[in-house]
Image: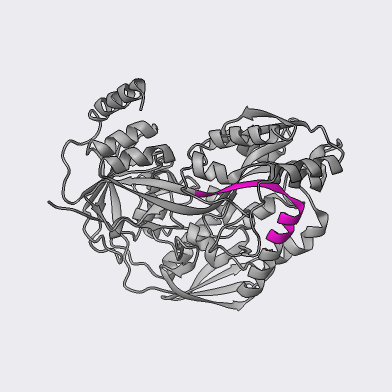
Amino acid sequence: MNPMTMILRIAAVGLLSLSLGDTASAKTLRIAMISPAITFGAPYSRDEGGMIRWAIYDNLTIITPGGDLSPSLAESWTIENDTTWIFKLRTGVVFSNGEVFDAAAAAAAINSLIDPTRRFPRLLDIPGIVGARARDATTLEIVTAKPDPLLARRLSLVPIPAPKAWAEMGPEVFAKNPIGTGPFRVVKWGAAGYRLEAVPTSWRKSKQIDVIETNTITDATARIKALLSGRVDVALGLGPDDLEEIKAAGYTTRIVPIPSVLAVAFRTVRDDAAPLKDVRVRLALNYAVDKETIVATILAGTTRVASQGTVPGIPGYNSNLKPYAYDPAKAKALLSEAGYPNGFNLSILVYGGLLPNDTTIFQKVAQDLGAIGVNVELRSMTFPDYARRLFNGDWEGFDAFSNGWLSIGIGDPIRAVDQFSCGYNAPFFCEPGMMPLIDATRTEMDPIKRDKLMQNVMAEFNKVGVALWLVEFSTITGLSPRVKNYATRGEGISINFEAIELETK
């Protein structure tokens, strides 16, 4: 570590001491977050900053870190017909304010979400629900406009708020006074974090933790120093370069795979005769990038090379597909065959922050493509700019852009697949012949048949080179030696707060 880096890290410790507690309580878990809970505890927001929803609320279903669909407030479910689902609910559950959870409470939550006068952001992820009603105290009926094989998975994104409190407070007030059935409740909001206290009546009680204190520290260096100085017990969002320092200090790390893939998306929906319209060119770019070196050197072996647009354990993962081999000679041959023996110019818009060191990854991609004659111009953009362009199709003539094939949330790649289809609202890649196969995955209710259909989608995407797939996602978390039984929920992106214990010595 160079002297200037050391000085900056020492300075960061000094600044943190002004805002973080000085004493570690045996029952208080202190966490250094990357981003705050921007929308506080609003149940139907898409903002997951602060991981607060898993602590406060429960959903009807959950997706496990391995991608499986599992019970939560709903113990079981059946499909009565193609558009009617029946959920049998857990009994003996109460909200933190004493309200009883039952089918009427669950129905109220679903009907609030789909209220057309509200336009809650989360509704974008839960399309097609017509309504919900309680058949009896423990039986919930949900009706959809058309067959939706993913409904049970989509419901893992819908927290259930206390219905009476929600109706009395309204969404804005409720967001700062959230009430759910989870193991913790909010007792204080701060400028950079929040304080939670355990709810003894929760059906998933905290094993030991009485209090959770969080502090948003956007700088990774400062998060590490907060951890190593004993100011926090958990530091989220660390990078591969930090592993050696954490290990040397006697602390531990958890590397958790996330069901998503980093890629460069290719634009083929355009009026000009762009090179990327030729499948041979797209395949050449995949063969030209040394992804094994990216994993080994830039990401310190913390993840794997991607072979397709999803990952093991997620529906649709095709185990027969292998990553494109690093083969510059083959890449050059394909370019020559396509009529580009001397290469061509390629402009790529990228935004950083999806993965640690992803900016360096894109620089490596540009370097490797340059070696086969493809001269890359990298132009940075912010995430809000990316979201705007993706929705509107405003790419200003750029040929490609960084992209995450995200299966997080519902543990299924359908959202990414939709984006790379002719049916997307602002299509940038289109293979008309694939649309019947893609459409079939949206309505096939048999999970085994649908999984096979999605595997076929991945195989076809691989064949035509829809994107330059790079690496699978993973996160790195630093843990104090006093943290025991650290675990994650929701596909590995949130903390299983109630399971954690702290060393009392």
| Residue closest to the eye, 239 or 440 | 239
**Residue in the picture at 41% in, 54% down:** 167
Decide: is 48 above or below 10. below
Which range is magenta? Answer: 458-473
| Residue closest to the eye, 491 or 88 | 491
Q: Is residue 293 visible?
A: yes
Was residue 435 drawn as part of the magenta stretch in this picture? Answer: no
The quarter of the picture where the N terminus appears is top left
Toward the left, the furthest residue is: 505
Give residue 482's position: percent from left, percent from top.
21, 50
Decide: is 201 above or below 280. below
**Image-based side of 104 in relation to 213, left or right:** right
Was residue 459 drawn as part of the magenta stretch in this picture? Answer: yes
**Image-based side of 435 in relation to 75, left or right:** right
**Image-based side of 220 in relation to 22, left or right:** right
**Residue in the picture at 21% in, 58% down:** 208
**Residue in the picture at 38% in, 73% down:** 90
Instruction: Please identify the quarter of the rendering in which residue 151 is found.
Output: bottom right
